[in-house]
Amino acid sequence: MGAIGGEVAEILNCFPLTVFKEKAGLDPAFRKRVGDLILDVHRTGPKAGESRTSAWTGDRNGFERLHERAELAPMFKAFHRCLLAYARTLSINCEKIDFHITRAWGTVTRAGQSIRRHRHNQSHISIVYYPVKTDGTGNLVFHVPDPFNELAPGLFENHARQMGLLTGSDILNSELVNLPVAEDDVVIFPSKTYHGTEPNEAGDVRVSIAVDVLLSLKDSTGVEYLLPPVEQWRKTSGF
Ligand SMILES: [Fe+2]
């Protein structure tokens, strides 16, 4: 609420993007085993897409099926708990919807590296988890290419700030939001959201786990939208 000419103006902020963050509650020894698993694959496997400034990501290197590993079940159980809490925040009826992991992979970010801005177009919900993350190794950054409040193109970009065209910087006039993240954090957001990371400016390596999730209906009878139950799918080659 703000005062204008003695009157109190009502400010309505519409159309939020909701990002969920919660501790997984996994013990340090388990988190270290997860980190060591990813670091081992990174050390010995292919390194497509990695450079001096770009992090290594398992999905680019044939390493995207972490959800099939029995030893990682405690981590995926924690993700499921967080996913239900996220869905309930949005009033999604979890009695009527199934959540499917389609892909789960590790990332390794060393000093000077970052993950450039991208989004997961093939997915509905994305989960990020930090088994190994110390201060200075880079936070998660969300980006909106066309903020609703940016009434003139470029007004919310960095050069506009540097030129003094904005007197302050907050959530109402930003195209970027930096989300501080720490070890054992689970972050959940819509997969269509553009995101990336800050550069790792510390000496420590950062290891994260990324998971893509698709929603399907438990019963598609009479429902036009959303994916029908996966059990009803059939390959066109199967006739
Ligand atoms: Fe991503």
Image (cartoon, rainbow, N blue to C red):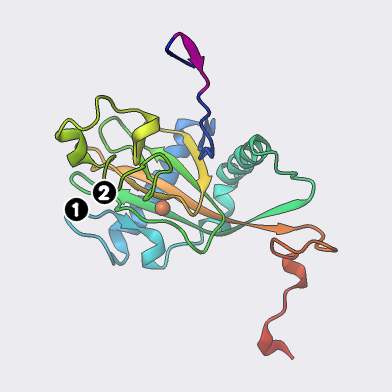
- Ligand 1 near label 2 (Cβ, under 8 Å)? no
Instruction: Give the labeled residue for mark 1.
Output: 53
Where does the image place residue 44, in percent across and percent down from the top left? 30, 62
Q: Residue furthest right?
A: 221
**Label 1 element class:** loop
> Which quadrant holds the C terminus?
bottom right
Q: Is residue 217 left or right of residue 160?
A: right
Q: Residue furthest top?
A: 6
Q: Residue shown at 17%/30% (left/top)? A: 164
Distance from Cα at disc 1 to Cα at disc 2:
6 Å
**Amino acid at the residue labelled 1:** Thr
Where does the image place residue 53, in percent across and percent down from the top left? 19, 53
Between 177 and 108, the residue placed more toward the observer is 177
Of pointers 1 and 2, the one earlier in the residue sequence: 1
Q: Which mark is residue 117?
A: none
**Amino acid at the residue labelled 2:** Ser
Q: Residue shown at 49%/17% (left/top)? A: 1
Name the quadrant containing residue 235. Answer: bottom right
Q: Which mark is residue 114?
A: 2
Tally the numbered discs: 2
Between 10 and 115, the residue placed more toward the observer is 10
User: Are circles 1 and 2 on residues that touch, CB within 8 Å?
Assistant: yes
Where does the image place residue 138, in percent across and percent down from the top left? 29, 38
Asked if the stretch drawn in magenta spans residue 9, the answer is yes
